[in-house]
Amino acid sequence: MRFRRLKLTGFKSFVEPADLRIEPGLTGIVGPNGCGKSNLLEALRWVMGEGSPKSLRGGGMEDVIFAGTAQRPARDFAEVSLLVEDEAEESEVTRRIERGAGSAYRIDGRDVRQKDVSLLFADAATGAHSPALVSQGRIGALISARPAERRQMLEEAAGIAGLHVRRKDAEQKLRATEANLQRLDELLGDQE
Ligand code: ATP
């Protein structure tokens, strides 16, 4: 999977719509302290389904919405879109958050669940927790990680993290089916 384009509106310091093309090869983001370099990386993680406000340096998820400055009023929503290309097929993943209304996700304009977005990226060996996204303090965290955490990172890198989610879903369906079968047996028993 290749990331082709990142679009932001009202996300953290990116109050005006910003549209960034991501060219093949290495991409570097340079700029003075506080200009928003880390915010860009956080926008990438956020659109891929990041659920922890703390890992986006916020107290609550709405903290990603432009909070206003002395000159500009705060915004009511933030939206980030990521255009990706996978085996020559393009798709656009969008996440939007509105004050008081939470997050909504779309893939190519279709409403989807957070889980659908996370699975899309997990299967492509990337995602909000991908080891390819190296934010400040991440190297230290990797070195001091416990074996279980390190295993999780390796599974994400190998693109198998999504299998755990599917296994949990399958187990839940299996339990529901078993309960249905048991109920059916009881009903049949009552009729005999
Ligand atoms: P450094 O080089 O120091 O690490 P950076 O270029 O990575 O800096 P960021 O940390 O991405 O910069 O951006 C910080 C800026 O984003 C600060 O000016 C902060 O006020 C602004 N900012 C963060 N969240 C919001 C928000 N919700 N609304 C408005 N501005 C925000």
Image (cartoon, rainbow, N blue to C red):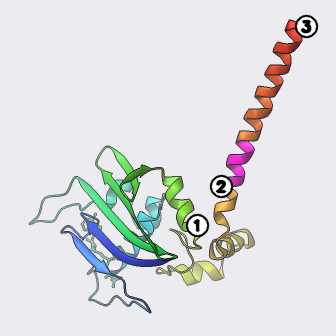
| Distance CA(mark 3)–CA(mark 1) | 50 Å
Q: Which callout, 3 or 1, points to the residue nearer the camera?
A: 3
Coordinates of residue 14 in the picture (x, y in percent): 24, 70
Q: Position of residue 119 (x, y in %)?
A: 57, 60
- Whether residues under marks 1 and 2 lie with C-beta atoms below 8 angstroms apart, the answer is yes
Amino acid type at image mark 1: Ala
In the picture shown, does residue 176 fall above or below 19?
Answer: above
Point out the residue furthest to the front here.
Answer: 88
Residue 133 % position (x, y): 50, 79
Mark 3 burial class by Cα count in 10 Å: few <14, some 14-19, many 20+: few
Q: Amino acid at mark 2?
A: Val
Q: Left or right? Give the position of 17 relative to 124.
A: left
- In x, y percent, where is residue 70? 11, 65
Q: Residue at x 85, y 14 (%)?
A: 188
From where the camera sits, is residue 60 visible? Answer: no
For the residue marked with disc 3, what is the amino acid? Glu
The residue tagged with tag 2: helix, strand or loop? Answer: helix
Task: Identify the main secondary structure in magenta.
Answer: helix
The residue at which mark 2 appears reads as 165
Residue range (magenta): 166-172
Q: How far, Cα to Cα, is label 3 from label 2?
A: 41 Å
Q: Is residue 170 magenta?
A: yes
Q: Are marks 3 and 2 in contact (CB under 8 Å)?
A: no
Looking at the image, tell me whether mark 3 or mark 1 is earlier in sequence order.
1
Residue at 36 percent across and 83 percent down: it is 22
Q: Earlier in the sequence, mark 3 or mark 2?
A: 2
